[in-house]
Amino acid sequence: MPKYIDLFSGSGGFSLGFDWAGFENVFSVEYDHEICETYRHNFPNHNLIECDITKLEDEKILSLVKDQEIDVVIGGPPCQGFSMAGNIGRKFADDPRNHLFKEFVRVVKLVKPKCFVMENVARLYTRLNGRTREEIKQCFESLGYVVEARIVCASDYGVPQNRYRVLFIGKLTDNFMYKIHFPEKVEGEPPTIKDAIGHYPKLESGESSDIPNHEAMVHSAQMLKKMSYVKDGGGRDDIPEDIRPQKGDIRKYIRYDSSKPSICITGDMRKVFHYEQNRALTVRELAAIQTYPDSYVFLGNKIKQQQMVGNSVPPVLAKAIAEAVKSML
């Protein structure tokens, strides 16, 4: 059974996909206590290390690995250093806000997995006309890996969501099989949001159900009035001008389009409305769009639950990535 390490594991979307593909977890790392509670609840047999990865010493990592061969290190280190202001000439890896990326590189250097997969926001691919992408590749190439980067859209792999991310996939070059494999796209039309959540019980604002995490948030009368004007797939222009929000994010005050995959799920979807019910989506519905099964329970307060779901790698996409890694091993 191939073995993996999951860094910056969050609530466990990446881990779940690799488990589904028949990989064995050696250990995972997450620093946020509330998120760790959710991970432990859903993966009671995984070895979760709850700590700041910058405090996780080399000796501890090696003791966790023991003499095991690690097939793949996976993870999505937060990379905040995108601002150009005052950053002219500064390299991506030198930006202190990207110190967690360097931690991912440190673990790869230390445990020398056969492969690694680093997932991140799509704009990393094109930043500074691709110079950031090449710099990231060079960090791993200097450790003996051949590396390729590609932007993928989750809906191409059976996820009911248009979610664009960049994947950096690397393989150790100490053998003759250098080909990098990316996940195989699924044939046919992608599933729609209605395919994903149409079967859940209908809820009014503030109502709950017997299904874990399927509980509607409480909306104000003013908000309910605004959303009542927005049609399936519509936006704020459907709201009468005298009560229409004039400012703010254009991705808010819109209704999901029932005939298409969902827009990208983020950590805050409170002002994006169900395609036919007057409310925001429940955590359960958001999790279903991210392809978590209903048996996967999110703990903590609702805002934290939404953040966990929004920051996840969709497990179905993670499984497709895991299958690609398996074909490289």
Image (spheres, grey):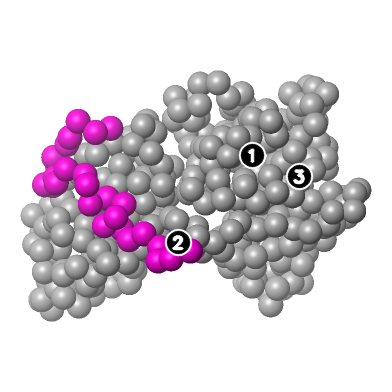
Whether 208 is among the magenta residues is yes
Q: Is residue 135 above or below residue 291?
A: below
Front residue of this view, candidates 188 and 122: 188
- Nearer-N-terminus badge (1/2): 1
Q: Position of residue 170 (x, y in %)?
A: 76, 53
The amino acid type of the residue labelled 3 equals Leu
Asked if the residue at tag 1 contacts the one at tag 3, i.e. Cβ–Cβ closer than 8 Å, the answer is no
Instruction: Please state which amino acid type lies under the numbered disc 2.
Output: Ser
Estimate how packed mark 1 is, as few (under 14), some (14 to 19) or many (20 or more) residues with alpha carbons within 10 Å.
many
Determine whether the residue tagged by mark 1 lies in a helix, strand or loop: strand
Rounded to the nearest angstrom, the CA distance separating label 1 from label 2 is 24 Å
Name which residue type carries label 1.
Leu
Secondary structure at numbered mark 2: helix
Query: How far apart are the alpha carbons under marks 3 and 1?
Result: 20 Å
Is residue 95 visible to us here? no
Residue 126 magenta-highlighted: no
In this rendering, the count of numbered labels is 3
Q: CA distance from mark 3 to mark 2?
A: 26 Å
Q: Which residue is mark 3?
A: 329
Task: Identify the residue position indicated by label 1 in the image.
Answer: 7
What segment carries the magenta color?
Answer: 187-212
Q: Secondary structure at mark 3?
A: loop
Q: Residue at x 74, y 49 (%)?
A: 328
Numbered tag placed on residue 155 in the rendering: 2
Name which residue lies at 64% across and 72% down. Answer: 126
Labels 3, 2: front one: 3
Picture residue at 75% right of the left edge, 58% below the top: 180
Left or right of 92? Residue 141 is right
Splitting the image into 4 quarters, where does residue 222 fall? bottom left
